Amino acid sequence: MEERSKDFNKTDEKQEAMYVSRVSIAVNMLLSVFKLVAGIIGHSGAMISDAVHSASDVFSTVVVMIGVSAANKKADKDHPYGHERMECVAAIVLAVVLLGTGIMIGADGIGKIMDGKYESLKVPGILALAAALISIAVKEWMYWFTIRTAKRIQSDALRADAWHHRSDALSSVGALVGIGGARLGFPIMDSVACLVICVFIVKAAVDIFMDAVNKMVDKACDDQTMEEMRRLISRQEGVLGVNALQTRMFGSKIYVDAEIEADGELPLTQAHQIAELVHDVIEAHFPRVKHCMVHVNPEGEGH
């Protein structure tokens, strides 16, 4: 029953992630077309660059959907521990896409600045300015819409996609500043804004990449979670001490290995019951824990 319940939860989480992703794709397609038209009509290179960033979000969300689907597959003979790390793979792909987008936008801005023909640059129109404001509002809403679900279902790929939305909102802030500066008589500001956008996007890409890599190489949980686990184990009946506690990230899930002390005179069945109690309470109190292994040492003989 417990395993069946976990399967139902995974199905619900997948459906939530897919719903959020479909909404993201629809909104990004409409927003990218709107910003592209506004950038062309309004003569704003920053807004056109911002439109490209929004368009890349569509591809990124498709990658997220593929990653979430793969991560929710049941364990099989070739993958006995499950497929959760596929979300990390999706996040790494997303980071590479973000990095490429940022470099392309930055290179375009540098090219225009190095050209030095500022007087030939057209002043962006009011439509480009309005598009930047609308984009900031929509993309910030999409960030919160996505991050809430990502936190609730503990999805790394969805969290990466949420930050993709946030980076798009920040890039639109850069576009707004550039367009506003150009309209105030500083046309070069539109190109400088492209560089600002580049920095935001590259920073987001690096953060997403490093987080995904850490979860691919069995990094331990944060100190606060470890301490909470240690205190919880120590409070269980029959536990006389915690000799060792190790954790490792497996995608968005956690594997726990604990060594506890118990009365050495206890029968094997009773010592086993204490280990089962620790196992069950850890998995119940920490939803991200996929499996907890408990080893019992006689009191005073722990390593």
Image: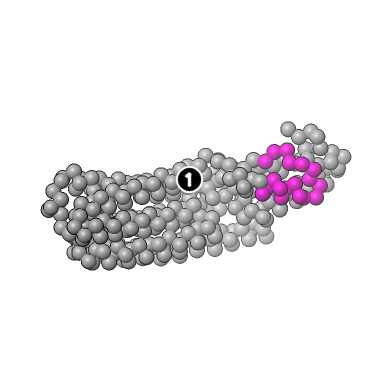
Q: Is residue 231 visible?
A: yes
Percent position (x, y) of residue 14? 51, 60
Which of the pair 62/156 is nearer the observer?
156
Percent position (x, y) of residue 92? 42, 46
Which of the pair 87/109 is nearer the observer?
109
Task: Describe residue 66's horizontal placement relative to residue 126 as left or right.
Answer: right
Q: Residue at x 36, y 58 (%)?
A: 169
Q: Residue at x 62, y 47 (%)?
A: 224
Which of the pair 137/74 is nearer the observer?
137
Task: Identify the amino acid type marked 1.
Answer: Asp
Q: Residue at x 62, y 50 (%)?
A: 289
Residue 232 magenta-drawn? yes
Percent position (x, y) of residue 88? 47, 47
Identify the residue position indicated by label 1 in the image: 211
Task: Describe residue 239's horizontal placement relative to residue 2 as left or right.
Answer: right
Percent position (x, y) of residue 274? 78, 48
- Per the rendered image, the range of residues in magenta is 228-245
Q: Is residue 273 visible?
A: no
Instruction: State whether residue 10 is above or below residue 94.
Output: below
Q: Residue at x 62, y 55 (%)?
A: 287
